[in-house]
Every structure is written in structure tokens, then in C-alpha cells.
Image (cartoon, grey):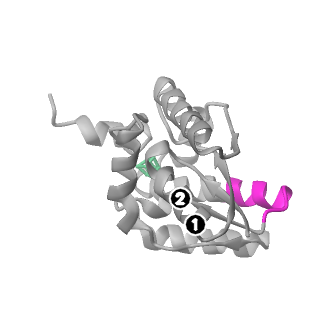
Amino acid sequence: MKMLLHICCGVCAVALIKKFRSAGHEVTGYFTNPNIHPYQEFKKRMRAVEVLAEQDKIKVHYEKEYGLKDFLRAVVFKENERCSICYEIRLQKTAEFAKKHRFDAFTSTLTISPQQDQALIKSIGTEVAKKEGIEFIYEDATDLYAESKESAKKRSLYRQQYCGCIYSEYERYQNKG
Ligand code: SF4
């Protein structure tokens, strides 16, 4: 299967690229993450994916524009529902890209993270897929997360300390003084 893999960061991508390739899929990456703030952090995570792409010889398409303004406009006054909006923005963009470029299906590295709401990702991805008329591959891959992190460490890939948005950065560090 010709599969488009939405990639949020190097850490989450390592084990999933291996998993899908071992299953015989032709995997192409897609970096679209307007939820990563601030700008220097966005660049660091994109760079980590570039390094990984080079190491694994995988083609990756990058949305290089920093999407801070649009992201904040989408979640303002709805901060408590922001993760649902954030998943939808990224899965929608991935589905559109996959459809436009004639992939058979799309999926996301979000499916590997135990910190993310897997039920919500499955439900939003399925809805987006139905709307766009392209298959969404969902498999809960959280059991591969530790391996992926370890692998990223061995490869010296940048490993982020918070989910991505400025809200998550605040939640991560608010009690650290
Ligand atoms: S916490 Fe993570 S998933 Fe939720 S909105 Fe922020 S970046 Fe997106």
C-alpha cells in the first residue's frame, strides 16, 4: 500500500516507519504541524525529521510555514478542546494531501503516543477519511513508544520536552519555578 504518514516529530516516527515498512507498505512522510511553538522549537522538530529522513532514506514532504497565528485563531476561547481541534487540523491536511497525490491511505505518528487521546484520534481520523474518501489506517501503536524513544536517543535525534503548543509548554513547566 502507498501510505502517507503524518509525522509530528522524529521520536514518534522512528518505530512507525519501521513497522509500516516491515508490513510491506511504501511509506512517505508528511510534516504538517502548526501546533508546534515557539518558532525555534518548530524548526528543531522539523530538523529532527529531516535527519531521520536522511538516515532512513524516506521521502518526506514538509509544510515549512510556521502556523502559529492560524492555530491560535482556531483554538482561542476553546482552549479546553484544543487537542481535538489540533488533531483535526493535522489529519485533515494529511488526508487532503494524500488524496491530491494519489496515496492509497494515510495515518499519523500520533497513534504511537500514550500521552495522546487515542480514541479521539481514531474517531477524528475516521471522520476525516469518510469526508475525503480516502482510507485512514488506525492501529493503536502505543506499545511501540518506548522502543521509538530509545531508538531516537541512540540516533541522537532531538527529543522534545512537551507536546507542542504554547499551552502544553506552560503545563509542562508551570510548577518548575
Ligand atoms: S497539547 Fe498537544 S495535541 Fe493538544 S493542542 Fe497542544 S500540541 Fe495539540
Asked if residue 170 lies left or right of residue 156, the reply is: left
- Compared to residue 21, the image places residue 173 above or below, namely above
The local secondary structure at tag 1 comes to helix
Which residue, given by chain and number where applicable, does mark 1 sit on? 22
Which image quarter holds the C terminus?
top left
The local secondary structure at tag 2 comes to helix
User: Which residues fall within the magenta stretch?
Assistant: 92-103
Which residue, given by chain and number where applicable, does mark 2 sit on? 18
- Where is residue 93 shown, x and y percent of the image? 70, 53
The answer to which of 99 and 172 lies nearer the viewer is 99
Asked if the stretch drawn in magenta spans residue 99, the answer is yes
Contact between labelled residues 1 and 2, with CB atoms less than 8 Å apart: yes
Q: Rate crowding at label 1 as few (under 14), some (14 to 19) or many (20 or more) other CA atoms within 10 Å.
A: few
**Location of residue 106 (image quadrant):** bottom right
Mark 2 vs mark 1, CA separation in Å? 6 Å
User: Mark 2 is on which residue type?
Assistant: Lys
